Amino acid sequence: MLEILKSERELIEQFLETLRALPEVKAELGTQDFVGLDGKRGYDVQVDLSVADKSLPLFVAARKAIYPRDVRQVLWQIREFIHRRPAEKGGGQFVPLLVAESISPGAKELLRAERVGYYDSGGSFYLSADGAYFFIDKPPPKSLSRSMRSLFSGRRAQVLHGLLNRHQDWLGVTELAEQVNVSPATASQVLAELERLDWLVSRGQGPSKQRHLREPAALLDAWVNQLTSLRPLVLRRYFVPSTKADNLLARLGQVFAVHNVEYAITSETAAQCYAPFLSGISQIRCRLLAGSAADAAIGELGARVVSEGANLAIIETKSSGDLLFREQVGGIWMANAIQVYLDLLRGEGRAKELAEHLRKERIGY
């Protein structure tokens, strides 16, 4: 408890320094702690803020991290405090503000909608009061960035993929884990994180507890926002001779089937199958499970490595988890629409335009 107390007081000191750096602003810590948004926490404090000689008392509550689910509780506590305050303190303007090491984007939106101030360790600051308005939006602190980045990579991403593809269903931990080839512990961790972000609803208790993804669009948007921070796709570019573009897809399907290669066509070719948009495609992109069978298939195709003029690009995968929810279309394995959408957004040319068309016409959220 003492260590938590120390870190949160340091964050409050950082907040005070930020205030003092603003023009025509003075800020001092109140002389005593108050029983505020959480009566058990004596380190909630009052900050005496002066903006252009206008006095604004800030009632500050410190938290480790704030997610949308936490905001509802905080708002309830604020309303309770406002209800008690006139009798206890003689009324006056009440300006609540939360400081935390990290505040998720969704939580910030909710706080702004309720005109509740906030400050995080990354330097983001919002305050709306009579006679004063401040809004400083900075990149999230590293702790939140790392947490979000890890959520959209590796086996955790497989859990997200499962939830997005079954967003209309109620799912238990074991059922979801089996479907996406991860451990129940990994599935449980991801579900808990999404609940904190307020993107899931739950029902039941214990082993029979189920979750439902009520905000698939918010989850997919968050995934898109993380693409630039994820490891770039590594493409092996080939030219397959004596094969017209229209026939190359069928040829790939035949050869991969003979060699029992696990694969999924993605990007423009798959998007065209799901939601036609372009008049023609010059290159096929394929997710391919690496191994001797894949090497043999590529050899039979007569494909040679090139730096330009490629008509086949291979994205090597090390796990079948990267091929989850693939679909057969005309005897050819296509990556699932969610994977195709994400791959398109990491592509070039008109790929991003095609991605938005695919999301509208096929994904639907």
Image (tube, rainbow, N blue to C red):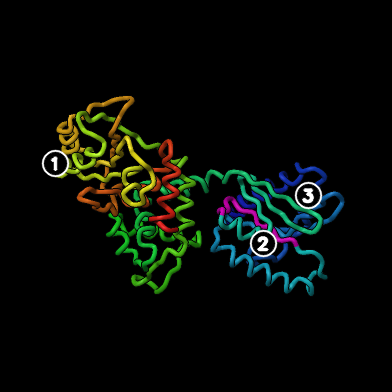
Which residue ends up furthest to the front in the rendered image?
279
Q: Amino acid at mark 3?
A: Ala
Could you tell me which secondary element the residue under label 2 belongs to?
Answer: loop
Residue at x 38% of width, y 66% of height: 168
| Side (left or right) of 94 relative to 179 | right
| Image quadrant in which the N terminus is located | bottom right
Few, some or many residues within 10 Å of mark 1 (<14, 14–19, 20+): some
Could you tell me which secondary element the residue under label 1 belongs to?
Answer: loop
What secondary structure is the magenta-colored segment mainly? Answer: strand
Residue in front for this viewpoint, 110 or 151: 110
Tag shown at residue 42 = 2
Q: Nearer the viewer, mark 1 or mark 2?
A: 1
* Sooner in the amino-acid sequence: mark 3 or mark 2: 3
Asked if residue 288 shows in the view, the reply is: yes
Q: Can you give x and y, in whole percent of width and height, for residue 315 in the image?
A: 30, 38
Few, some or many residues within 10 Å of mark 3 (<14, 14–19, 20+): many
Q: Which residues are magenta?
A: 95-105
Residue 103 sits inside the magenta stretch: yes
Q: Amino acid at mark 1?
A: His
Q: Amino acid at mark 2?
A: Gly
Q: Are marks 3 and 2 in contact (CB under 8 Å)?
A: no
* Sooner in the amino-acid sequence: mark 1 or mark 2: 2
Tag shown at residue 27 = 3
Distance Cα–Cα, label 1 vs label 3: 71 Å
* Sooner in the amino-acid sequence: mark 1 or mark 3: 3
Residue at x 87% of width, y 51% of height: 53
Distance Cα–Cα, label 1 vs label 2: 68 Å
Distance Cα–Cα, label 3 vs label 2: 20 Å
Q: To which quarter of the image does residue 192 belong?
A: bottom left
Few, some or many residues within 10 Å of mark 2 (<14, 14–19, 20+): some
Residue marked by disc 1: 259
